[in-house]
Amino acid sequence: DAGVIQSPRHEVTEMGQEVTLRCKPISGHNSLFWYRQTMMRGLELLIYFNNNVPIDDSGMPEDRFSAKMPNASFSTLKIQPSEPRDSAVYFCASSLYMGNSPLHFGNGTRLTVT
Amino acid sequence: SQQGEEDPQALSIQEGENATMNCSYKTSINNLQWYRQNSGRGLVHLILIRSNEREKHSGRLRVTLDTSKKSSSLLITASRAADTASYFCATDEFQGAQKLVFGQGTRLTINP
């Protein structure tokens, strides 16, 4: 079991550029979550999917953020255009099912927007 | 939205001592979970306690849940240097889609 795989581990980009973060959940897991972590705001839930369908995107901060899950083994979080305040660590997590099931986190993508 | 809030924000103890961290939450829950995060890594699930349970053990970890007070505690006994990490509680919002919401965490430092 390789765990949740996120790429890239680090991303440095200039303001205005498009950023795409990638996630491969654990095989067989039905739910996928995108979180953002900053010192100021802690761990924020951005969006989550169940069976590849977005369930709640109320945490997505602005229209500049979008997420997709085209199949059970892949998800992307895109920021276009990026801004310095988007700098954070972005985590993807998956779970066997929603509700009473532990989350398995990837090691995150550290995004720096200059 | 912040559901769980941990207390204290930071805790520093000597190796071998016990560490207790608390979590308070606001709404009804189905379950409460505790996670650990080492620096530069993702969160790791430690233990899940359901709303109808009052206490649960896993190795050196003991978790209690008091739904009347909307609070939980995590006790780590006989602490080790390797326990140095941040600890988070997470709760599922009872109504609606049951998304998991994390608190701000407790930063635990174990001094050798």
Image (spheres, rainbow, N blue to C red):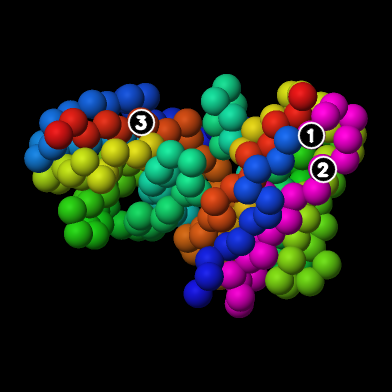
Picture residue at 35% right of the left edge, 31% below the top: B107
> Which mark sits nearer the N-terminus, 1 or 2?
1
Instruction: Identify the residue position indicated by label 3 in the image.
Output: B107
Give the CA separation, mark 1 to mark 2.
Answer: 8 Å
Visible in this render: residue A70?
yes
Q: Assign a secondary structure to mark 3.
A: strand
- Magenta-drawn stretch contains B39: no
Left or right of B37: which side holds A7? right
Disc 2: host chain: A
The reply to whether dot 1 and dot 3 touch (C-beta < 8 Å) is no
Q: Amino acid at mark 3?
A: Arg
Q: Residue furthest bottom?
A: A28
Q: Amino acid at mark 1?
A: Thr
Q: Amino acid at mark 2?
A: Val
Q: Pick whichever, B31 or A77, lies toward us.
A: A77
Q: Same subunit under labels 3 and 2?
A: no
Instruction: Identify the residue position indicated by label 1 in the image.
Output: A13
Visible in this render: residue A54?
no
x, y percent for residue B25: 45, 35
Residues drawn in magenta: A13-34
Instruction: Identify the residue position indicated by label 2 in the image.
Output: A19
Left or right of B87: which side holds A103? right
How many neighbours does mark 1 have within 10 angstroms: few (below 14), some (14-19), or many (20 or more)? some
Picture residue at 67% right of the left edge, 65% below the top: A24
The relative height of residue A66 versus residue A61 in the rendered view (above or below) is below
Give the CA separation, mark 3 to mark 2.
Answer: 31 Å
How many neighbours does mark 2 have within 10 angstroms: few (below 14), some (14-19), or many (20 or more)? some
Task: Quadrant for residue B48, please give it.
Answer: bottom left
Closer mark to the observer between disc 3 and disc 2: 2
